[in-house]
Every structure is written in structure tokens, then in C-alpha cells.
Image (spheres, grey):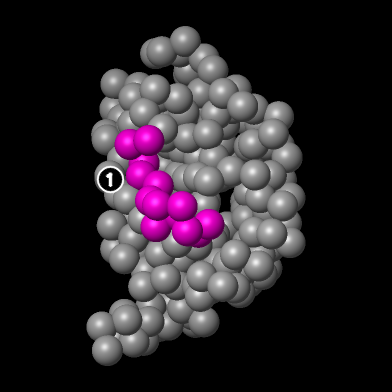
Amino acid sequence: MRRATAAAALALLAVLAVACGSRGSEDSVESLLTPPQERRPAAAFAVARLDGKGTVALADFRGRPVLVNFWASWCPPCRRETAALVAFSRAHPGIAVLGVAVNDEPADARAFARRHRIPYAVGSDPDGKLVDLYGLPGLPATFVIDAEGRLAARPWYGPIGTEDLEAFAAALSRPSGSRRTAAFPHRGQAETSAASAASAVRSPISR
């Protein structure tokens, strides 16, 4: 009942969500980055591993940057971004990638992971418990977390591609406190543009 109620509420977002699209140029990686002194801790969580081998927790990756990617096998934009995430995880062993299948049947998510040969850890959140914890408005969504467990950028909503993944990797490799001074628009402006662009690229969280 609780899951059905949550799914029904989330379905209201469907009128604002379109499965296909691309982000606007105003939502570049640079515009989403958060200066080190302003970063806050990412919400801790632990979920069952999709492969059935115990649990996977965000804390497991402390000491190295991690990209947390929320997805579902039934989400078309999620399918489009998977190849880029797989290639990125293989090219950047120093940056962890953690996938979390949200509101997805574990069997379907496992089949998806096998089909796309996902090499990184994948957790399963079939009841969507992390939706509220991370404020997910739709799928896919990617959160960039630094080696200290802090949110290094505002969320990336919609499918993420190779170019933007590489830009995040470059940002994470910069010395602490280093940033490009002209890259950050006014916070309110960035959040408004990100929200409007996100509504054009994400799938609703419930089927």
C-alpha cells in the first residue's frame, strides 16, 4: 500500500517529464559545480546489492570520488546513458561509479545490468526509499560526490554523456579550492535553469 501510494504521488510528475531530450548549454558541468568550502555531506544510505551479495553503502566508497547514478530498466533515457557510464567506469578506476536501480523489479534490473555488461556496483531500491532521501524528481539522476563524502555539484538530471562525465572527472581532479571563476552563474539562476531543463529530459520515477 505504501509503495502504491508513493508511486501514485510520483506519477503526478509525469505531466512535466518527457522521456527524450538534451540539457541546455546553461546547465554545463561548470555551472553545477559546488566550491569545496560550500559542499555538504551526501545523505548516507545502504541498499541490497543487485547481485545478491550483501549490501552496498555510500560509505564503502569514502576516500575516493563516486558518481551515484539512479536509474531503472524501464527508463528510456537511462538506457541511452548506460554505455557512457560503463566506458567511464573502465577508463577512470580512481573514480567509483555506483548505480542504484529505483522502483524497478530486481529481476528486470539484473537482466538490464547483464545485457549492458555493467562492471560497477549496483544497488537495488525496489520500493523507492531513496527517492525522498535524494529528492529525485525523475530518472535518470546522477550525483557527484567527492572523496570526503560531500556533494561536489548540484544533481545532474537526465541522461549524462561522455563529454560531461569527463568534465566531472576533470573537476574532481583539481586541487582543493581550485575552480574557474567565471563558470558559476548566480545560484538562483542556475537552479531555475537546471529545473526547467530537467523537466525536458527525465522519465517519471514510477512506471
Which residue is at the far top? 175
- Amino acid residing under circle 1: Ala
Q: In the shown orientation, is residue 108 left or right of residue 56?
A: right
| Residue 35 appearing in the image | no
Report if residue 57 lies within the magenta region: yes
Q: Position of residue 93 (x, y in %)?
A: 61, 27
Name of the residue lying farthest toward the front: 53
Numbered range of the magenta stretch: 48-60
Q: Relative to 142, is 151 on the left or the right?
A: left
Give residue 177's quadrant in the image: top left
Residue at (55% x, 29% y) in the render: 95
Q: Is residue 67 above or below residue 191?
A: above
Residue 8 or residue 3, whichever sits in front: 3
For label 1, the crowd category at 10 Å Cα-Cα, with few meaning under 14, some 14 to 19 and many 20 or more, is few
Q: SS of the residue at dot 1?
A: loop
The answer to whether any part of residue 43 appears in the image is yes
Q: Residue at x 47, y 10 (%)?
A: 175
79 in relation to 155, above or below = below
Count of marks placed on residues: 1
> Residue shown at 32%/81% (left/top)?
3
Between residue 190 and residue 89, name the one nearer to us.
89
Q: Which residue is mark 1?
A: 43
Question: Percent from the top left, x then y, of residue 58?
Answer: 36, 41
Residue depicted at x 40% and y 47%: 56
Is residue 19 covered in magenta? no
Q: Quadrant of the N terminus?
A: bottom left
Q: Is residue 65 above or below residue 156?
A: above
Q: Where residue 46 sits: x, y (%)?
A: 32, 50
Image side of residue 44 versus residue 197, left or right:
left
Q: Position of residue 74 (x, y in %)?
A: 61, 74
Along the viewing direction, whichever of 118 and 152 lies nearer the viewer: 118
